[in-house]
Amino acid sequence: MSLAEVLNVWVYYDHSPQLEDVSLVVNDHDFLSIIGPNGAGKTTLLKVILGLIQPAKGSVTVFGSPPKIGRKQIGYVPQDIQFDSAFPISVFDVVLMGRYKGLLSPHSEEDKEVVMDALRTVEMAKFKDRRIGTLSGGEQQRVFLARALVRQPRLLLLDEPTASIDPDARKAFYELLTSLKEKMAILLVTHDISVVSVYVDSVACLNRKLYYHGPAEGALNQLEQVYQCPVEVLAHGIPHRVLRRHTDD
């Protein structure tokens, strides 16, 4: 069953195309990664699915509805979440924010139970009373993931969630996502090519245009075209491809 469908979408920034004729389908229980260089339109594509950006051409449906309606069933972890680390807010209260329904709708006991379930899922329940600013980068990302999960989504969107955490925390985070795909579809934007080889089921190679959309094992052959420079295979415990030193023509 398709949860989100992007069909022949074009997006322009200042008359310059950011997405060019992109078509993408996210099916139930997919673990799909979007990879590509900086400025490739990866975050833009997520915002199109969320209904935060209206495409100039093309169509988007989310759970069979326009994105602004269908996004009620989406959990979202944005890139570079900014907050004052000295602000005295607990992990529990950060996650509870994900259940916000408006000023006139106080949080219920059910909301609080859902928060604790999400914290247990991401293995952060023991930190529920800790001030979030005291946590490590990997721990904070788990809290932000829990905040997305309290929406009880059928589709989870994550934009570079492991960019600022160490390799061990990154590996544990990916393994957590792998367990979550039993309950929902996951769409992950990342620069980490090791994800393609080890964790995800399918890959979309994006550089304004969509160069590939299919099984993960077929994506590695498309990297040179997507990044428009040579790549080579290295092994650092996990086999993956990285960009090789190159000069612009």
Image (cartoon, helix red, strand yellow):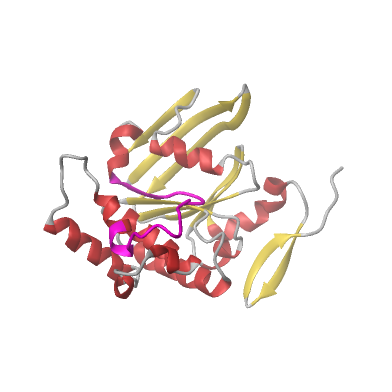
- Residue 187 appears in the picture as rendered: yes
- Residue 153 appears in the picture as rendered: no
127 left or right of 40?
left
Residue sticking out furthest to the bottom:
237
Q: Which residues are magenta?
A: 73-93
Could you say which quadrant of the image residue 123 lies in?
bottom left
Magenta span includes 82: yes
Could you say which quadrant of the image residue 216 lies in?
bottom right
User: Front-most of 89 and 164?
Assistant: 89
Residue sticking out furthest to the left:
109
Residue 104 position within the rendered picture, expressed as x and y whole percent measured from the top left: 15, 39
User: Front-most of 88 and 187?
Assistant: 88
122 left or right of 111?
right
User: Front-most of 110 and 184?
Assistant: 110
Number of numbered discs on residues: 0
Residue 182 position within the rendered picture, expressed as x and y whole percent measured from the top left: 32, 63
Quarter of the image that includes the C terminus: top right
Q: What residue do we see at 74% from left, 46% from top?
A: 228
Magenta span includes 26: no
28 left or right of 136?
left
Q: What residue do we see at 47% from left, 72% from top?
A: 172
Question: Magenta stretch: dominant SS?
Answer: loop
Work out whether 231 lies above or below 169: above
Residue 167 position within the rendered picture, expressed as x and y whole percent measured from the top left: 57, 71
Q: What residue do we see at 46% from left, 59% from top?
A: 85
Residue 113 position within the rendered picture, expressed as x and y whole percent measured from the top left: 17, 63
